[in-house]
Image (cartoon, rainbow, N blue to C red):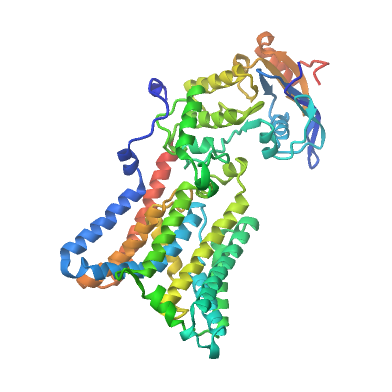
Amino acid sequence: MTTLDGLPTAERRSLGARLLSANTFWIALVLLALIVVFSAIAPESFLTFFNFQQLFIETAVLLVIAVGMTFVIITGGIDLSVGSVLIFAGMISAKTMEWMSPGQDASNAGWGVITAGLVVAIAGGSLWGLINGLLVARANIPPLIVTLGTLGAALGVASLLNDGTNVRTVPLELRDSLGFGTLEGNIPNLVVVAVVITVIFGLVLHTTRFGRYTFAIGSNPEAARRAGIGVTRHLTNVYLLTGFLAGIAGFMSLAYFQSTTISGHTTDNLNAIAGVVMGGTSLFGGIGTILGTVIGVFIPAVLQKGFNIIGVQPYWQMIAVGAVLVAAVWFDQQRRRSQNKR
Amino acid sequence: MTPVLQAQNIVKHYGSVEALRGASFEVGQGEVVALIGDNGAGKSTLVKCLSGAEIPDSGTILLDGQPVTLDSPVTARRLGIETVYQDLAVAPDLDPAANLFLGREIRRKGLLGKFGVLDKAEMRRRAADEFTRLGVTLQSIDVPIGALSGGQRQSVAVARSVVWASKVVFMDEPTAALGVVQREKVLDVIKRVRDEGMAVVLISHNMPEVLSVSDRVEVLRLGRRVARFTAAEASLEDLVGAMTGALTQEDAA
């Protein structure tokens, strides 16, 4: 401190210095390296427009969940229930559209019914988010336990709604627009929706007061409280947001698969958490970026596609993702330790 | 002259424990008053009562001569009373500017501001100005505060309180765990703030520090004020004597 007294106070670091210290930068390099390696090994099949189009489509739903998860993890929390909430939202949306259609067959339903389905999906997701939020923030139950509870409960309620089977009459109009429709003929609508949501909530996290409070609470809840921030209310809203996004993801999934896929999302929660953490968001809270989450979500997807194309058994992908995940958390801990020594 | 902040006969119980038994205290504009006492004398409890963190069971608190009820730290802050806590209470992952404006963020003008979009550049600029004014030197304004040295972190915590305070700043052991140079830095900030007309209350166990920086000293013992000194006329023996009970002033309570 003494040696620096002669310098002007409070300069900004150069862009390069800030870039090198960001976890996001290093994880982006990993993603880039993966793409380069797979492209070099199989240029004709990996580096194709079709391949990347598929990659984006298959990642879109997970990305929407992971954006919400980023907020929760930055507050120092966790949400295990997102996959179940997604299924619940899809289920209640599909059931609503069936109830509103003649003969309980929603296949030929029009936009009125589809809009009602969207509203119900969002409301259903938000409701579970609100339950999570109230239990975590007001009842002070650890988020791991709360969302483990709602993980089971949301899936249970979803299964009860249709006696444990999937709803299969999903409006064809929905499939042709959101599910398989494209913008300008080559950008899938599903991807457009995911990108728009990611950009909006990236801006919310990084430029608004809501985002600033999310970081502050994760960094030091007591400091946030003493600064006059309504911590309880803000935490509730963060879990509500995650549920809201899981609701939208449920509707997207319904449009894409034309089914409620009851058994298809059991590992979505872990995939989302893995993506968020690999992207440099700290499980201890206070640190994270949406850009990092985008990159973190694409690493497993690129690995899977790449291994598939070059003929490596897909099980290697699980091992590789596991290793990257553990390494990411280890780096985060090292960084924290060196910081706390000062 | 009316004291800026005055406490009269404050009583505070925690269950059967009497932390404050009719304690009084006062601090005036542009003076540093040290509040000292042995462990358990009631210093922290008194500060909590005067900064809104605890509500006294009985007694009167006067701000500029008017009785006030400080029912929360937010209320106290709105009235111009800020506190630097011993455990700092900064957000280590946020940068100094973000910490300075925590809970008081500046929003952009117009529609973006309505959506809650922050004016980060303006906050950084104003934070840099304030740090310069208070003589706080930081090598960079956009590193997380957790990456700064202990003294710099402390300086930011002190700066945050004095920037927003309009009347009184409480500082609970602001130099504990600091090196010699860093300690001098923080004491410099305290003097600057005092010279600008703020009332500063310093809680400290370090007697030489108390005598060097404060204008007056008030001594608590067993939940009561037992002595008041002008720092320039008091000796180390006087202070220790008052704290241990060897010396009492009849008119102090």
Q: Which residue is drawn at 45% across and 48% down?
A: A206
Q: Residue at x 60, y 14 (%)?
A: B212
Q: Quadrant of the N terminus of chain B?
A: top right
Q: Quarter-wise, where is residue A298 in the image? A: bottom left
Q: In the figure, is residue A171 to the left or right of B76?
A: left
Measured as percent of width and height from the top left, residue B249 is found at: 80, 15
Number of on-image labels? 0
Q: Quarter-wise, where is residue A189 in the image? A: bottom left
Of all residues, the one furthest to the bottom in this rendering is A103
Q: Can residue A271 be seen in this view?
A: no
Q: Quarter-wise, where is residue A161 in the image? A: bottom right
Measured as percent of width and height from the top left, residue A81 is found at: 52, 67
Q: Which residue is drawn at 24% across and 56% down?
A: A33
Q: In the figure, is residue A267 to the left or right of A162?
A: left
Measured as percent of width and height from the top left, residue A332 is found at: 40, 49
Measured as percent of width and height from the top left, residue A176 is found at: 39, 78
Nearer-the-camera pick, A274 or A48: A48
Q: In which quarter of the image is the C terminus of chain B?
A: top right
Nearer-the-camera pick, A56 or A281: A56
Q: Is residue A291 above or below residue A166?
A: above
Q: In the figure, is residue A99 to the left or right of B148?
A: right
Q: In this view, does A123 lie above or below B108?
A: below
Q: Is residue A161 visible?
A: yes
Q: Is residue B97 above or below residue A123?
A: above
